[in-house]
Amino acid sequence: MTAALLVTMLFLQADGPSRVIFPEQSLPLRFSHALHLKKNIACDYCHTKAPESTEARDFLIPAEEACSDCHPIDRAQPFKVAKVAARCDACHPGWQGQGQPPRVSVPTPHLKFNHKIHVSRGIACQQCHGDMTKVELATRAQMPRMATCLSCHVGGTKAPSRCGICHLLQPAGTVQVEYAEGKLAPSGAIRGDAHTPSFRKDHANVARNDEQYCLNCHRKDECLSCHNGVLKPFDFHGNDYVSIHSVDARRDSIKCQACHRLQTFCVGCHQRAGVAQDVSSGLPTAPIMRQIKFHPDGWVQRDLSGQPLTGFKTDPNHHAWQAQRNIRACAACHREQTCLECHMSASMAPLPWTKIKGNNPHPPNWVESGRCSTLVAHNKRVCFKCHATIDNRALACMP
Amino acid sequence: MFFAPLAAASIARAADFEVEAETIGQGYQLRQCDDAGRCDTLLDRRRLTQYLNLHAFRILPDDWTGPRHDRNHLYFTSSLRFDTDFGNYLNAPASGRIPELPRAQSADEFQLLYAVLGGVDMFGFLDFQLGRQIVFDLMDFYSFDGLDVKVRLPWWVALEAWSGLEVRDEAPIASPIYELDGTSRGSRDAATCLRLAVGRPGDPCPDQHDMIAPTFGFAFESWGIQIFHGRLAYRRTFSDTAGRTAGDGLPPQGFNEEKLSYTLNANLGSFRPFGGLRYNLMLGALDQIEGGVKLGFAAGHSVLGEYIYNAPSFDGDSIFNVFAVFAYNDLRLTYTTPELGDGLRMWASGFVRFFNDSTADVHALPACSPMPCTPANPPNNRTATPATDSEAVGVTAGGRYKLSGRGHVRADAYYDNGFGGLRVGGDVSGRYQVVLDKLDLEGRLTLIHFEPDLQKQNGFEATSFGAQAGALYTMTQGVRLHLLVEENNNRYYNYQLRAIALLDLTFLR
């Protein structure tokens, strides 16, 4: 586990700390931590407020007084020569003693942090800020990355792992991600979920594995703003998607189902647009022949009078091939009634508007298969949509 | 009334309230096909959707939530939607084709998408949700009315249990968007009427779809472990048989769903495997497997490899479960660069998908199987193979360039072919904040050629050019207007217009 964390941390070093969490700083200073640490000066000798700090907004950079203990600074003599550096431009490079020196600007990090608690737990400064013995001026680069925090904040008894322990929260309890400096987004170090442009299409492999993880930053209504089946996200579905969508749907409708359900979304629109025409119960003739004009020749076996059009699954265009490969594509236009027109068991009372029935749609050895007995054991009702209750074949695979 | 004691308890601090109203007006045109198979007219569809979302957060006082408001978070969240259609999309003869979807049910719908009283990190170990809620996991998108409780045990394990009623189309103010698929209001139709099975086709058909469907489930989940997350979940949904009478041979009850799923992901530095599988107990088969790994390399290069196995499954009352015989297998590979230079990121991906079929099985069948040979069931030609490919392949490549923090330009090119059809093309899109925090402009150009594989006979192939332009105007804090216009041209129509207007109003207190 330690090795894994170490690798994670090394991986993260390349990116540096977040510019949103730790905004850019202005440090017109010259300073060598390496030199001071070589003289065995303790961190809190200069950073006197750090051990007692309880807020991330506390300004912990030492003021001039801290330096004056060792450096004989005299504001009246900006170019004073002394054994220990005392010239103003020793620390304020380029400043000639006129007016104010260039100001240090360290914006408040967008975090909650309590130095006092960490110091009281015996956590050394370098555990979070790294080895300072080779560092000259400390910058944002010496701020800890999230992976460093997570080496202790793992939940359980060691340290709490709730996001709100460190991150600022919205009223909804989610992490605040919008700042003037930009939008906070995962680096990908924790779950491989870097929000790259392609993540919009690939996010399911993270979200479906652990919904709660996403909900740390996103409210659920944010998910529903896209997954709602009402509005086409223009940056997701391209132009003229209505014309093109059939290619996607035939190939991978499980992704479509993240927003659209076949029987309550697709069918209604397809039938209104005349792309699919449902069997209208009670009509004297079923419009099944009309569908043949949309589908290729050889799509169905017989016409309404029972005359064969092509043989059973022998035509290269026969619908059974497509239905067995991806039945969802069929269900996007048709409801169960369409199938029952021809596939209803011969033992059933005939539908008033068709003479066709008894075309067995089951795969070979269905009765002997465990799948048949499992389905019957769980929901026998589905069998009775095609078979009569007296139909022995419907019950043949009962355990 | 329910909130009365909470209101009394929160004297020390008022809750945060948020009211959102979103109005969406859409107008677009759809090709309509007539009975002769000609698809050269355009239907006008105009749609108005109104959302009203109400939220209350931090309902408990500071004494409970702590100074950082990071525990004992009690909240209420809800979303109401009114959706209606206009235009000749609804008019005869089109609407006459679907008598089971009368206007009252297919338009003018008033839906409660969700309404949840929830708690997060209550007493340091408990999460709960009570009300109409939506669940996203490997099982499916799913909606139910009920209670979900998750307890985090001290040993990096959380136990979750839930129970309630599945939200179905015919439940009061329900939305069918996450209903189990495969059945429809057609349950009343003569063709799917269970009365036929008991030999009483003249009797009124009870509506199986209208029966309440109790659901329950439980899950074991890891928590607090940074390098690993796993979840094992079980869910069952069932319903009584509608209109059953003693001795009619119909079963008293049936399962609509019974599934067991397991997901996991691990973070091993730059090596991050993930995966999941779902066993459909109702069908006795694994119906979903997915696995993959994301590799991260120095300086931010990443590679994502995925494998997906998917066998279609439906509501237990759907005969589509019987027709769905084969699964498909899918392999995907995606490479993404880090941000190069001053904000350029590029990616490329490819997939290959294998659709199984029963060609070998059919060739091996007896001459007239499964029915006896008759004049109406002649011997078969055993040499036929499907006309369409059983594989599909595709590649995509693209890049996005950030424009000094105020926008971006993006370009994508794609080619895919095989089962489903051919599609080749590309598009360029962009967005730019013209006036800081006030006005964004956006646009998209697309050129694409497509040939659906089943429509070759009908010559249904085209090259389409589309252009899109939009503006997002923030009038004041919490008030935004988004306008978009899309215009498409191909050989079927000289112009096909789509326009959308969104007005977002958000009020916070």
Image: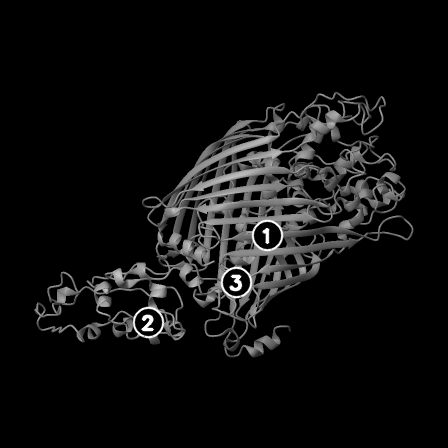
Does residue B80 appear to the left or right of A364 in the view shown? left
Q: Position of residue B156 (x, y in %)?
A: 56, 64
Identified by mark 1, the residue type is: Thr
Colouring mode (rainbow / by chain / secondary structure / one colour): one colour
Please say if the residues under marks 1 and 2 sit with CB atoms less than 8 Å apart: no
Give the residue pinned by disc 2.
A58
The verdict on a common chain for dots 1 and 2 is: no
Q: Secondary structure at mark 3?
A: loop
- Three-letter amino acid code at the position of disc 2: Asp
Q: Are marks 1 and 3 on the same chain?
A: yes
* Left or right of B201 in this view: A322: left
Q: Indicate whether A395 appears above or below A220.
A: above
Residue B213 location, quadrant: bottom right
| Alpha-carbon span between mark 1 and mark 3 | 16 Å
For the point 18% across and 76% down, which residue is it? Answer: A69
- The chain that hosts pointer 3 is B
| Disc 1 crowd, CA 10 A, few/some/many (<14, 14-19, 20+) | many
| Residue tagged 1 | B263
Name the residue carrying label 3: B224
**Residue at the location (46% across, 62% down)?**
A175
Quarter of the image where one finds residue A391: top right
Measure the C-alpha gap from mark 3 to mark 2: 30 Å
